[in-house]
Image: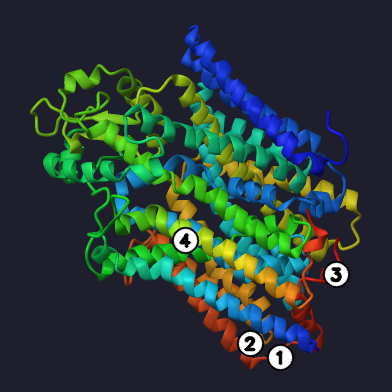
Amino acid sequence: MASKNNEAHWEKTKGLMKITLALWFFFGYVVFMFGHDINSMSFLGYPLAYYMTAQGSLAAFVIIIFWSTGKQQEIDEEHGVSDAGRDD
Amino acid sequence: MFKGKFVDNLPKIYGTYTGGFLAFCLLMAICEANGMSAKTIGILFVGFTVFIYAFIGYLSRTMQASAYYVAGREVPTVFNGMATAADWMSGASFVAMAGGIYFGGYTYMAFLVGWTGGYILVSSLLAPYLRKFGCYTVPDFIGTRYGGNVARFAAVLVLVLASFTYVTAQINATGTIASRALGIPFETAVYVGLASILMCSMLGGMRAVTWTQVAQYIVLIIAYLLPVFWISNKIGAGFFPHFMLGDEVQRIAELEKTLGLTKNSAAALKAAKVPGGLAYISNPHSAVPAGAMAAWKFISLAICMMVGTASLPHILMRYFTTPSVSAARRSVAWSLFFIFLLYFSAPMLATLSKIALIDPNIPTSIIGKSIAEVQGIKWVQEWTAVGQVFIADLNGDGKLGLNEFFMRSGVVVLATPEVAGLPYVISGLVAAGGMAAAMSTADGLILAISNALSHDVYYKMINPKADTAKRLIVARVLLVVVGVFGAYIASMRLTGILGSVAWAFDFAMSGLFFPLVLGVWWKRATRAGAVAGMLGGLAAGTAYLIYVGPKFMAQTPWLGIDHLRFGLIGAPVCLILMIVVSLATEEPDAKTQQMVDDIRIPTGKTVSGLE
């Protein structure tokens, strides 16, 4: 069976997964549920919904994925199960 | 010149390569200035780059199973990110994406969100765990996690169906580009394209594909970004277009009002003999259609593309090549970054291309001018001659209206440099970029199919005693067979590029998404559940596709779920079957549960025991 340490590690990993997917859901879908309503607002001179689908959500995904990867690395190290030493 | 191990020298090697490629572009520019013909430049661009890829493929030849299947698991994070980006961005992304945005507007741009957001699913739910598992192929994971040849074979079935739908479109795209660049008939060009694809993968398998894909990414990203920046500066739209085209987007909205967005009737199009497949501007550039159905259409397409991303084996298997679990995870992030560079430029290219064509204040514009004058323009003549552009004076006023200029959507990217008056060397570069994009994806897909057939079907199911040499020969024979079959289908021109690309995502999500994710995240998932889910999901999705597909039964879609979105039927069926059947069968044995526990921890040996 999984050790206590491994179980705690997995609980934290699950927590991070949920937060990451919540952010993903917001930028991937929630924003576009209101696409028509927010398009009258503008950002950098672009209509907002147009901006989000052209760049905004895409950039948010990049930021979320690097943030989440960094967090997971912290969780792995905290529980002494990181294998980062093996690579590049 | 380079001391030490190959992988230690990667930055130097690819730095030199990039410099060499830029020098080649410069040389071509000088040749053009000295009177070299456009045709020769096109041939040299495509020929030179394809030769380089084939050379890399030759240098990466191998007779080791781990090098052939997973590139020896020594691909550094950032380079694997580049290779994945090339693997991912297909001929459709490169050639058809900006054109789709150009003609389809906001609704079409759901593809941008869908084709990027899926990587968050890959990194959070799958890639690190599959890497820890240490398999050679995606069905290898399914086969070992759930046990038994039936589960393995069901996964191979979904993989082959999804990847094969995708690969014919890629071979088609290489054929189209080779046909134009080399001036040979499409039916022959398809096989020329295939030969170049196979040269990159046959000798070295995954190792060769990895290092050619990195080279292909460099070419395709230069070929995409350079024209965007150049045109933007040329027409005074801003030196960094991505942050400075707000005015142009608003200007297009104004012009749409003054010029009028008209839908042509089918009868008018027929009377004017407009060739099928050519599009005209009738959708607003940046306006968002109102209503819940429009929002659902956008969101549902994004869901299918994202979930499909996380189920496509040719993408997932790229993360089997990193040295460690944490490297696999970071590599997904880098992949998304490199993909983002192209995707956030596509709407900018569409905007620039459109404004250069319709804004009367810009010298290159043609809308509103007299038709006789427009027909005298060189690029209009050339593209009309090959049936990619068409002009029809529908209202008989002698002037070109917005709804009277027709163009094949895929041509927007290829023709924009000429439309904006850039030197031909840029068009040659763009052709080389399109070729790189289509070739890299085709290589990844053909390898995914033939590896599944050689490793999972031949080695694991038919002949487990086969030695490495024999396995690798079988793998290569299958590679050629799959490629030739794909080229044969492509040469029959059965489908348009994008229809079939979206289908690949739907097939993959219908059959593979939940079996993969639950295999890691739900210990209770059983063999019977997985098999029922894969086969049931695939069957339900396929049946629905046949029901709504415009070329099949063409019935009215349910809730707007049309043939591009049939995964929304297949995947839920897969999930429900998997849960119900899993709970109805006995829980997996202790060994399997221990295996799942091991996958979840980055440290320690791979679960499969394969190096």
What is the number of the mark on residue B582?
Answer: 2
Chain of the residue under the numbered disc 4 shown in the image: A
What's the distance in space between the residues labelled 3 and 1, CA to CA? 25 Å
What's the distance in space between the residues labelled 4 and 3, CA to CA? 35 Å
Q: Nearer the viewer, mark 4 or mark 2?
A: 4
What is the number of the mark on residue B605?
Answer: 3
Q: Amino acid at mark 3?
A: Lys
* Residue nearest the observer in this picture, B139 or B428: B428
* Residue nearest the observer in this picture, B550 or B10: B10
Chain of the residue under the numbered disc 3 shown in the image: B
Please rate how many residues cluster around mark 3, counting C-alpha atoms within 10 Å: few if below 14, some from 14 to 19, many from 20. some
Please rate how many residues cluster around mark 4, counting C-alpha atoms within 10 Å: few if below 14, some from 14 to 19, many from 20. some
What is the number of the mark on residue A60?
Answer: 4
Q: Amino acid at mark 2?
A: Ser
Q: Residue at x 46, y 65 (%)?
A: B304
Indicate left or right for B320 with B249 as reference: right
Residue B294 on image: x %, y %: 28, 64
